Image (cartoon, coloured by chain):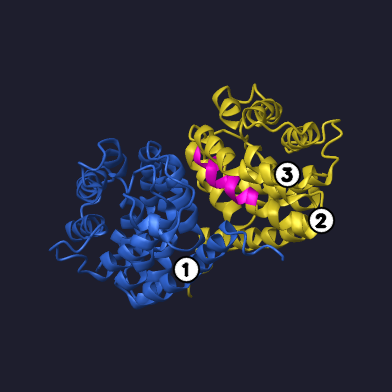
Chain colours: A blue, B yellow
Amino acid sequence: MMYSPEEKRFLRCQLPRLEGLVEERLRLTPACHALDHTQRVRRAAAKLAGLEGADPLLLDYAALLHDIGRAQELADQGKTCHAELGAEISRQILAELGIENAGFVDAVCDCVRQHRFRRRGQAGPQSLEAKVLYDADKLDSLGAIGLARAFHFAGRIGAKVHNSAELAMNSKSYSSEDSAYREYLVKLRRLPEKMLTENGRKMGRRRLLLMQQFFDSLNLECLGADLLD
Amino acid sequence: MMYSPEEKRFLRCQLPRLEGLVEERLRLTPACHALDHTQRVRRAAAKLAGLEGADPLLLDYAALLHDIGRAQELADQGKTCHAELGAEISRQILAELGIENAGFVDAVCDCVRQHRFRRRGQAGPQSLEAKVLYDADKLDSLGAIGLARAFHFAGRIGAKVHNSAELAMNSKSYSSEDSAYREYLVKLRRLPEKMLTENGRKMGRRRLLLMQQFFDSLNLECLGADLLD
């Protein structure tokens, strides 16, 4: 993105107002997607932006706004697509902030809209910034934080603490037989290979290794096999 | 415990009926203390019994029955002490099963009553079997399974996914600012030193190490500090 020095200064000076607006809106969002998730995605996006040569200012905006439509999707149990809605809300918020650079606004909204790309015939993230945001968001579902969120989510929906791989694979999401392990087996362990930047994939693989080791330990402990003989 | 060969055979052959009764009653208990917790405690108690020279048959009964009063305590938000109530219910169930050995019945009920010993002026577990059950129950709050249960519980009560050590230490249990990390800092990390058998302490320390490493990783990830530079 090309900015004049004045534009860049203005965009930077509006960031604290944007943070305040995002914080306000995310109060309604359950813990797994609350403000701290957005803050972690923002930090990961900043690191990835540096490594991939993406626009860090654009990513600051896009990361802060990426889950701005999430509360609505959770409230109507998935009828709303939070990425689509988020792009619309983002456009309103950027207008409220007085940001007139149409290229910048379009690019931010594109990142927000594409961060939930699921490869169902969609083109998916095209710009480098949209790819970085996508990967930064996925990173927060991996590693220790990914485990913490998956078990927390299982507790919130009344699913099991743990089950066997066989039972996990035969259970349905959001059911009482669901578990963090099902989420891992069905979805999370495939995330690194779905990432869109080389550095994202590398970071993702490292976090995935921690998850694999954790579930290996958990499975041993559930049999008492880690205990002394 | 001294048994005649006939008594031992009878006690063993009543175990499947006891398992059925326990399974039935634990259907009402939320995931963190459901049947699979009892099954894990039973396995850990069997291992510890072997190492400590405790009575494995008595511990089979005591472990199966240890949380039999838990649903009631959770239903009335802690007014009932599940260990006290559990000892009473255990006595009824053992009578239903036709177990007449008064020494055995007393010893099982004693284990169930004492497994929740919290050192508030109580004498606490005195028999070796009561000590083994106490340690086996604590082991299930440590390690990967302890982490899984702590995050699952945080999700169920609407607490945070994670917070800083400072925020964790200043939050209250069951509040929206509560977290698995608070539970770890305030309670779980002290469990191994509170254990009552040498082998329990050893196993507990190993599981605690896994938790420490997990929270170290989680804290790094929350800062993005594990990501490549």
Q: Chain of mark 1?
A: A
* Label number found at residue A207: 1
Which residue is identified by label 2?
B53
Mark 2 and mark 1 residues within 8 Å of each other at the beta carbon: no
Q: CA distance from mark 3 to mark 2?
A: 22 Å
Residue range in magenta is: B30-42
| Amino acid type assigned to the residue bearing label 1 in the image | Arg
Q: Residue at x 38, y 66 (%)?
A: A189
Q: Residue at x 48, y 35 (%)?
A: B27
* Label number found at residue B66: none
Q: Is residue B160 in sight in this rendering?
A: no
What SS does tag 3 mark?
helix
Q: CA distance from mark 3 to mark 1?
A: 56 Å
Decide whether the magenta segment is chiefly helix, strand or loop.
helix
Q: Quadrant of the N terminus of chain B?
A: top right
Q: How many C-alpha atoms fall within 10 Å of the one at disc 1: few (<14), some, or many (≥20)?
A: many
> Which mark is in front, 2 or 1?
2
> Which mark is in front, 3 or 2?
3
Q: How many C-alpha atoms fall within 10 Å of the one at disc 3: few (<14), some, or many (≥20)?
A: few
